[in-house]
């Protein structure tokens, strides 16, 4: 066994963030009656939210903004695109979103099967995520993933963010692992793949979106089942 320790990313790798966030936001759109407030179409709202969320997460991971700003400003900016400048509503939506999102359970195809396969082969599995501590643990419990992972390392707990090598070093220390016996699996070329490389780990890029990698991972897979060919 070349990699006794397998480190996974959570969102967009195992846990289907886009599907789960769409379901959550659709519910918030209805319960907060955004249509009557000047946001006529949910799909347009979701597109603007996704755009701003991606942009703000990039700023957050690079240390330019703090958690609280990310949490409510992605809502604020999405509403602002519809000329709705309501900070109180934006902050309320941000709170509601993080309360309801972890209740969603959609996973990428073959997630449970591949984790079961790896567990039966005696791999020691861990999660490394830039997500918020309370939210991520709630997601893991609700999606029935806790049984597979020994350690769950969040950016909050480690006081560092992927791709900084410190979060990976913190994770390996918690897991009792060393880089040469560890592999990082994730969907994000900057956070997961470059981050793993920064920490001296081999990496697997989960290319769900079939993009052209601009960073070279050790392996590339397009479906989680393909991990069986590597591990």
Image (spheres, grey):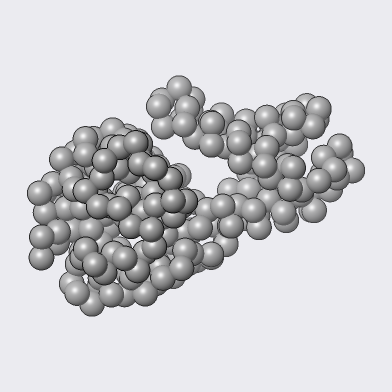
Which residue reaches farthest right? 36
Which residue reaches farthest bottom? 120
> Which residue is at a point 31% across and 65% down the rendered structure image?
226
Q: Position of residue 123 (x, y in %)?
A: 19, 67
Q: Position of residue 7 (x, y in %)?
A: 26, 54
> Which residue is at a point 79% across and 32% down the rendered structure image?
82
Quadrant, the C terminus? bottom left
**Along the horizontal axis of the image, is 95 left or right of 44?**
left
Quarter of the figure with residue 48: top right
Quadrant, the N terminus? bottom left
Which residue reaches farthest front? 212
Quarter of the figure with residue 140: bottom left
Residue 49 shows in the view: yes
In the image, residue 166 sits, relative to residue 10, either above or below, namely above
Q: Position of residue 134 (x, y in %)?
A: 46, 50
**Along the horizontal axis of the image, is 5 left or right of 204?**
left
Q: Position of residue 188 (x, y in %)?
A: 39, 43
Quarter of the figure with residue 230: bottom left
> Which residue is at a point 57% across and 62% down the rendered structure image?
104
- Marks counted in the figure total 0
> Which residue is at a point 10% across and 49% down the rendered structure image?
180
In the image, residue 88 sits, relative to residue 15, either above or below, namely above
**Along the horizontal axis of the image, is 40 left or right of 139?**
right
Residue 174 shows in the view: no
């Amino acid at each position: 066994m070349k990699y006794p320790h397998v480190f996974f990313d959570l969102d967009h790798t195992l846990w289907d963030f886009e599907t789960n966030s769409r379901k959550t936001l659709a519910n918030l759109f209805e319960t907060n009656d955004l249509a009557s407030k000047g946001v006529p179409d949910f799909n347009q709202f979701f597109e603007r939210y996704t755009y701003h969320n991606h942009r703000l997460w990039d700023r957050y991971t690079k240390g330019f903004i703090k958690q609280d700003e990310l949490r409510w400003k992605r809502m604020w900016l999405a509403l602002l695109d519809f000329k709705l400048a309501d900070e109180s509503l934006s902050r309320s939506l941000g709170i509601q979103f993080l309360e309801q999102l972890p209740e969603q359970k959609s996973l990428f195809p073959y997630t449970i099967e591949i984790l079961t396969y790896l567990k039966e082969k005696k791999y020691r599995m861990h999660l490394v995520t830039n997500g918020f501590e309370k939210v991520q643990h709630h997601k893991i419990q609700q999606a029935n993933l806790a049984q597979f992972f020994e350690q769950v390392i969040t950016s909050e707990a480690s006081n560092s963010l992927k791709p900084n090598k410190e979060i990976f070093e913190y994770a390996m220390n918690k897991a009792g692992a060393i880089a040469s016996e560890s592999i990082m699996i994730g969907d994000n070329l900057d956070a997961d793949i470059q981050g793993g490389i920064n920490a001296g780990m081999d990496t697997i890029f989960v290319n769900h979106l079939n993009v052209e990698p601009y960073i070279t991972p050790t392996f590339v897979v397009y479906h989680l089942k393909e991990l069986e060919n590597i591990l």
